[in-house]
Image (tube, helix red, strand yellow):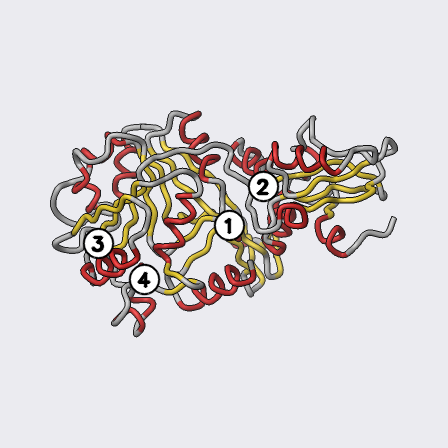
Amino acid sequence: MIYSKRIEDRIISPNATILDAMKQMDVLDKKLLLIVSNEKFVSIISAGDIQRAIIKKVDLDTQISTILREQIRVASPNDTMQAIEKLMLSFRMEFCPVVSDDNDLMDVHFWEDIFKNTKPKPVFQFDLPVVVMAGGFGTRLKPLTNVVPKPLIPIGEGTMLEEIFSRFNGHGVNDFFLSVNYKASLIKFYLNELDLPYNIQFVKEEEPRGTAGSLSLLKGKIDNTFFVTNCDIIIDQDYSDILKYHRDNKNELTIIAALKHYQIPYGTLETGDNGELLEIKEKPDQSVWINTGMYILEPNLINEIPEKGFFHITELIGNLKKENRKIGVYPVSEGSWMDTGEWQEYDKTVKRLMDK
């Protein structure tokens, strides 16, 4: 059967690997793919399916056919558009395949065609505090940050802070704490002039305290589970999914991690005893998990931050690990992590958001 390019782009073979599916989703900037084999519809695979598999330690080289859900939602050729729209709204479907009794893929209805600029709602709303670490000097973005602090770097028609606020507010969040230091008065002035519809409190570091030191200033101000995010990153993800993972696993701290792909530009050698060559790989790919700079913490952890001195969140994580306390890692794809902390990544992020 001949499909449109738009549908063809979403098709993946059941023999493809989890890593193949992640890469295809990132290229398309989508989170749902069609699985078709021998011109017959097989199933669909979502970013959530992949995340659940990774959390269960399924290898990235595993074929996606082994991690498919038993039940999926599709439409039949006899369904009305009204019924299809209701189905897509109810289950936040990026697209809805129309499949015949013989498993022929007859058509695909896409969210953006039906609901235009309206985005699917999160799985659930939550109103938890969000701490934005906005005190850094932005040295990798000099000379711009000699004048403009990193949190106010322009993104589209606004700033990074506004983008972060908007994404969390879409999940129901209204309370933000901004940890500020460098050019704090400029950040305060800018936000006060905007008169945003959020409850924004400023926490001023008297000196640089590292990536977690300023959390000690929140003692007595936060008594619930809270998010922490760097001011130069965006995670394109349903945050309620991350929160559910954190709660279901009873974590004290959850790290949001992104898969990063590298191609080593050389042949690599594996050797054995006495330097015997065991294997040679020509320009192999390597995948590693990167700390994105977004976390979920339980409020009791604030009391474990020293009140003075430089303290990174990695030190807190290390302390928790030594005590065998519960730390989780929630995986997202490489394309779901947008970084603006250096020029090359900033340019990519701006282009991607403008394309959206």
Rendered view: 46 above or below 310: above
Query: Which amino acid is tagged 4?
Result: Leu
Residues at marks 2 and 4, CA–CA distance in whole angstroms: 31 Å
Q: Are marks 2 and 1 in contact (CB under 8 Å)?
A: yes
Residues at marks 1 and 4, CA–CA distance in whole angstroms: 22 Å
Residues at marks 4 and 3, CA–CA distance in whole angstroms: 12 Å
Asked whether 76 or 252 is in front, the reply is 76
* Secondary structure state at the residue bearing disc 4: helix
Which is more N-terminal, label 3 or label 4? 4
Where does residue 239 sit, x and y in percent of width and height? 45, 39
Query: Which amino acid is tagged 1?
Result: Ser
Q: Are marks 3 and 1 in contact (CB under 8 Å)?
A: no
Where does residue 244 sit, x and y in percent of width and height? 45, 30
* Secondary structure state at the residue bearing disc 1: helix
Q: Which mark is residue 336?
A: 1
Residues at marks 3 and 1, CA–CA distance in whole angstroms: 26 Å
Which is more N-terminal, label 4 or label 2? 2
Which is more N-terminal, label 1 or label 2? 2
Mark 3 vs mark 2, foreground winner is 3
Note whether residue 140 is visible.
Answer: yes
Q: Which mark is residue 152?
A: 4
